[in-house]
Amino acid sequence: MSKPQKSTVKVRRFSRAFVWAHAVNAISFFALYITALPMYTEFFDWLYPVLGGPEGARLLHRIFAVAFVTPTFIWVIFDFKGFKLWMKELVTWKKRDLEFFTEFVKELFGFNFKHVRQTFFNAGEKINSIIQILTAILIIGSGIPMWFPEIFPRALVQWGYLLHNVGFGLAIAVVVGHVYLSVIHKNSKPGYSGVITGEVPAWWAKEHYPDWYDEEVAKGNFPDIDKNGNPKKPTSPDKKKKKGA
Amino acid sequence: MQYTDCALIMGANPAENHPISFRWLQKAKDNGGKIVSVDPRYTRTSSMSDIYAPLRSGTDIPFIGGMIKYALENNLYHKEYVAKYTNASFIVNANYKFEDGLFSGYNEDKRAYDKTQWAFEKDAEGNLVKDFTLEHPRSVFQLMKKHYSRYDVDTVVKITGTPKADLLKVYEAFCATGQVGKAGTIMYAMGTTQHTVGTQNVRAFAIIQLLLGNVGLPGGGVNAMRGESNVQGSTDFGLLYGNLTGYLNAPTSTDVKNATLAGHLEKETPKTGYWSNKPKFIVSLLKAWYGPNATAENEFGYQYLPKGNKNYSHINLFKAMYDGKLEGAFLFGTNPVVGGPNAGKEKEALSNLKWLVAVDLWETETSAFWQEEAGSNPSKINTEVFLLPACSSYEKEGSISNSARWMQYRWQAIKPLGESKADLEIIHELATRIKGLYKNEAGPTAAPINALYWNYGEGHHPDIDLVCKEINGYDTTTGKLIAGFGALKADGTTCSGNWIYCGFYPEEGKNRAKNRDKKDTGMSLYLNWSYSWPMNRRILYNRASCDPNGVPYNKEKAVVWYDAVQGKWTGVDVPDFVATRKPGDAGFEDPFIMMNDGVGGVFAPTLNDGPLPEHYEPFESPVKNPFSSQEINPAIQLFDGKFNERGFKADFPIVATTYRVSEHWQSGTMTRNQAWLSELVPHMYIEMSEELAKEKGIKNKDEVIVSSARGEVKAYAMVTKRFKPHKIDGKNVHQIGMPWHFGYKGIATGETANRLTPHIGDANTTIPEYKAFLCDVRRAD
Amino acid sequence: MATEYVKFVDVTKCDGCRACMVACKNWNDLPAEPQDFSGSVQSHAKTTADTWNVLQYIEHEDSKGNLDYLFRHSACFHCTDAACEKVCPENAISYTDFGTVVIDHEKCVGCGYCVNNCPFEVISLKEYVDKNGDKYKKANKCTMCTDRLEEGLQPACVTTCHTGAMEFGDKAEMIKKAEARVKQIKDRYPNAMVYNPQGVGGTHTVYVLAEKPSVYGLPENPKVPTSAVIWKDYAQPIGKMMIGATTMAVVGAFITNTIISKKKNGKNEDGGEHHE
């Protein structure tokens, strides 16, 4: 059976700053996760030798903790516009965002689903972002007194342990889904290359974020494309023009 | 102690310095006994006590004098005991007088008394005149009453600084033990003795205890807590400069009677009391020392004994050293550069020696006195110092005697480290080598050395069992061990190295110092645990726990009694009495068998500074003596010049005292080299009141400098609520205190408190006055 | 289970001699830790990794201005509900049959959770250096000489205590003794009390205190920190469940996707329908 060839036309979805910020965030998150696992449950104690013993694990955890704090700054400094857009999206909730979730579950498990029209970030990504932000604040905020218990009141340190743990649980739960969607779930896969390179196939972008895509087309930033991603009109020379900043 | 109804702790801090004694005090408390602490500073002992009363250092005699008056006036004394068992009924010679702080017979030039002025009156037959009604105006009782009538509560409070309410609480609590059947004990230590009136301080305790009937019974007594685990043993064995072993007086050349043994024996031996046996002890001692070389013909070697004509106390020895009159010195386990009075001068004195042999576990501040580290210039010091490494107690075998006179044998736990040797081995080597050097010589120097009987086996290690046997004594013809000092003879057929211990090794294989039976043989006396001299008696003068008929005053706490059926004394303790003495026998009612008169001495006409304790201010004091115009003890020997600078109130207004802490021992040589003890008390500090600190602008933890007429010491300030200024005659008199353990050697180091203390001693013992002197304090920066 | 034992410390019998401190170092072979001058007789501010018991010296003035000099042998309480045991991520802290709480150094990773959660602040980390010169940490505290208990001996501090301020014995009996003692000393110490805090299920060191706990710097009502309870009893299990659930969800999703995409091969690439 012959399948219609998808167009290779790509559009820029994310700025370089975001790509970097996301990469640092993701790498440090996983590093923190790995280095914390044996502390979270002794089931993972076998990781200690790998990490250079408890001392090594602690040291790595602290190095990555510092790395984990940096992405926000990278994004804010190098792509403030993008950051602002993200913030704006996070606080904008409409009916379609709720509809998204019913369809998302279908999509997740591979059933037939409808694309609910979404803006730059879909509702799922927004939820992901919000939870990630909250858990990051929780984890970073509680991590500092854990790191320097001698300069904080004991009660704060004690609550720090709890909040770090809660933050960890939440973050992991969200990240597992996030990663699955991007890396394994084939419908979302192009998103994965998006955060790596900053670019996504135009057809995929249009399908998943039609409101945003159309907006960009209207601005003349993106080519108008058909179902297979081929330009309806001759490709404009500035199709790869950077979006945003 | 656990049987006491009230323990008066004065001049001591047993919770800190004699903690094991507190095991028994705690038991006394559990049994309802009261603990009273009298101390310039609120100590850990005070915190464990029911009553605490502060006093200014050096005012023990007013404190107890007031108590004597209180007991007499309120009829709290034990009347039968006082009349029968003390010399209160004796009549004193009409020459006896006491005026303005001086007893009759004082010679100002010699700073000494003619003690014959205080003698007891005797009838034509030479018997003592007594008045058992105690009403004769020259009876000891009436003289004492008159003497202490001056020590009224208000005057006492004015000089001791003790709040009146606290003083009366102490008097009331302790005098309650005067009730028949009650027992009170006084526990004291160097806070009592280290004064120019140290002996009289203890005498004051003895008087109140005799008045309250508290001597000779469980839970009673005047208990010296020793400053070292074997002080008792060392004084028993003649460590004191005026003694041979067993408290036999060393003959001096100042008395012509000592020129011959016969003269010496006559002079030393009283007609009555147990000391009438003294010739047996002296001759047996000479036989132990000179063996076959001691014969009746040569006065049993009596002439070999050195006969000095000086006071050989610590201060006087160092004075002689300071004046360049001593060539050499052996210092066995002693560290005068830290522990001696006016220690800066003692260090200077050492440099006048040609040679110094120090025997110690570590190099001490004393054996290193010549080093630059000690602040000396080695090129200017010609003293040759030999340091001999000594073993610790765990590395050697032998015995020590505790303050209850228990001679406890200790076995070797570990082999000596390195080349260290036991003191006994060092002495043995010295003796055998010196004897070897003089072997072929004759003349007065060689004679005593050649005559010395040194028969403790061949080789480098003496046979300690032979030493033990000689201490006990044996029959010099058969070699059979003597069963007890009652069997010693004055004819040279017995020997005994220390008559009071005779009986501890009564037969072959039975060294009773090795007894270790934990069974309570009654009244917690544990008769089969170690050996207590004399004759394993645990409570001295225990006859005094019974009434004149031999019936215990307190049946629940009975230790000995007269058993009419058996016709002898018996009990759970060994009777400190002639067991077969029956009612009606001469002396049946005289419990104090070592006293010539068989009774306790309320009045002591033998002491150098008076028959009754009288208050004099310390050598250095900020207060005028309200009792007389005699400011300081008139009978003390004064040292002047650079050897002993004296400070006065104008420059040094603060009273200072020294003391110890639990964690350090003596000059700290052993403990300051021990990491676990050093960490507990790692720094030299002084304790002062919040009030004084405020006046001087000193904050807790500040570094301060304490100065006296003799030196300066830098230390940390420990500002504490436990020191309060004394209200003396309405004015604040400040007092500070400091531990004296520190020196610059070892792990825990600090400046030496004794650089501040004076070279002045008690009138009888010359023990230095470490406990009360004047100083000033300022911030170090 | 062996008999439950407690160490009964009657501070009113303690004379502050500190033999317990030396006996502890001696038995447990702990090094000395000299401190700067503290301004008091007390040698260490509190227990440390090398000083498992510290004798407290407190100059306390009561409301009437009467001075008391109070002492307390302070060491691990060996709580029945021990916060340290609860928060240890490595199960390195456990209860023994004697009721003592001990740290297994084989398992301890030196995270310090126990240090910061102990309501009595008696646990400390100690830094060690291994044979390669690498540093590592382990938590340390009083073991109640569990190694001695196993041999039928008593804790070293108890054995050395000469005033009988410390006793080691059957829990019920010791508590009875403590209560009787408080009655006995009420005249001298009106605020005297038995300190056996129930907030941590009772302790295996039971005190008779002469004063209110706060005078000794002790919490009046210590308990396992609420944060630790939520953390260990709720957050951790829920967190694990959540991670499990999410993982199950993605695994499920992967499987269904694989199955469904095989069936629908050739349909829309992402299976989505457009509703334009």
Image: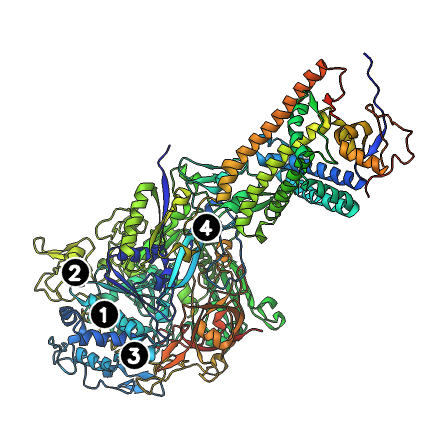
Chain for mark 3? B
Along the polypeptide, which appears first: circle 2 or circle 1?
Answer: 1
Chain for mark 4? C
For the residues labelled 2 and 1, say whether their Cβ atoms are less than 8 Å apart: no
Q: Which residue is mark 3?
A: B156
Tell me if residue B751 comes above or below residue B538 in the rendering: below
In whole angstroms, how far apart are the C-alphas of marks 1 and 3? 15 Å
Q: Which residue is mark 4?
A: C53
**For numbered disc 2, what is the local secondary structure?**
loop
Q: Residues within 10 Å of mark 1 (few under 14, many from 20)?
A: some
In whole angstroms, how far apart are the C-alphas of marks 2 and 4? 54 Å
Q: Position of residue C239 (x, y in %)?
A: 56, 34
Q: Residues within 10 Å of mark 4 (few under 14, many from 20)?
A: many
Quarter of the rendering occupied by the N terminus of chain B: bottom left
Judged by depth in the image, the label closer to the viewer, 2 or 1, is 1
**For numbered disc 1, what is the local secondary structure?**
helix
Q: Which mark is residue B172?
A: 1
In whole angstroms, how far apart are the C-alphas of marks 3 and 2? 43 Å
Tell me if residue B600 comes above or below residue A169 in the rendering: below
